[in-house]
Image: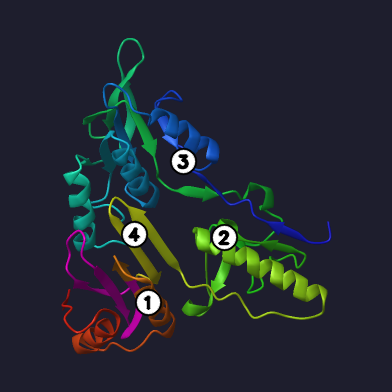
Amino acid sequence: YDKLIIATGAEAIHLDLKAKPDQLFHLRTVADADRLVHVMQPTDQPRRAIVIGGGYIGTEVGAALLNSGLKVTFVFPSEWFMPRLFTAKMAAVYQQAFESKGAKFVQGKAQCVETDDAGVMTGLKLKDGTIVDGDFCVAGVGAHTNLDLFKGKLELEAGGIRVNGSMQTSNQDVYAIGDIAAFPLKLEDDKIQRQEHVLNARQSAKHAVQSLLASEQGQTTSDYDYLPSFYSRLLDFSWKFYGINEGEVLHFGDFEQGRPFGAIWIRDGNVVGLFLESGNEEQHSSMQALARQRPKAQDKAGVAAIIASLMGDDVTVEP
């Protein structure tokens, strides 16, 4: 080859629970999804699903299972789900909505599936001995990057292949994009990090191609300038987050289903991250601008003014 773009991505972490293929599902590929959809089909007796993991995949899969008429129990070790982003106050609203649809939550770590004498799954045994009843499990416990091919050949960092602002690796003829790329985040003074998200996959791919074509013509492009962002639509909710969730967190709005609410992260006196549930496109655009501009917010009054510009004057702000 003359030029190479690496897009090997990541694969789901697989749990060893001594389970048969129809007892434990992982979700990463279309084939994985097809297998899961098959067991979600309506039956005379509603099936009982156990969702292992309380992160991005777990919550969205759990919502889909509930919407398909299955009984769902979430199992994860943290005090509340989505702990890498949600505060306890935020998570409580979503958990109450899940529980109102019949979902259950159990805190713990999975050890192995339980079966009857015929080998049919009856539940999941946790490491503390607790037995959670269920007919099958879906595990969403993270992913690991596909790096084996590149070890000892390219510079690695932050669990991925290190690239520069043009998405070039330590070999100038080789580029990396998506989950596998560890790039300098301009917002954070070029701190090297990876972003496992579809938006980064698309935008880093576009930037790599633009950089490659420009270099072929003896030109240059500006460095990759990604704004970390996440979003999810589940049950009757729709939330978006922009920026970095570090520092002091302040909450705003009405923390109940069907009402707009959110959070703002303040680090070193500046806004660095914003979260909003049930926002509109205008508000989302303002959130992106604020996450990039990082305005000063030295006190509660300053934060209130920023929130008022986003939501209006009658929105309360609290820790």
Q: For the residues marked 4 and 2, what is the alpha-carbon distance in whole angstroms?
A: 21 Å
- Quadrant where the N terminus is found in the figure: bottom right
Q: Which residue is mark 4?
A: 84
Q: Which residue is mark 3?
A: 27
Nearest-to-viewer mark from 4 and 2: 2
- The verdict on residue 255 being magenta is yes
- The verdict on residue 53 being magenta is no
Q: Position of residue 222 (x, y in %)?
A: 64, 81
Question: Left or right of 17: which side holds 71?
Answer: left
* First of labels 3, 1 by sequence position: 3
Residue 182: name its quadrant: bottom right
Type of amino acid at the residue the image marks with label 3: Leu
Type of amino acid at the residue the image marks with label 2: Ala
Question: Left or right of 68: which side holds 107?
Answer: left
SS under mark 4: loop
Mark 4 is surrounded, within 10 Å at the Cα level, by few (under 14), some (14 to 19) or many (20 or more) other residues, namely: few
In the figure, 168 relative to 91: above or below?
A: below
Type of amino acid at the residue the image marks with label 4: Arg
SS under mark 1: helix
Nearest-to-viewer mark from 1 and 2: 1
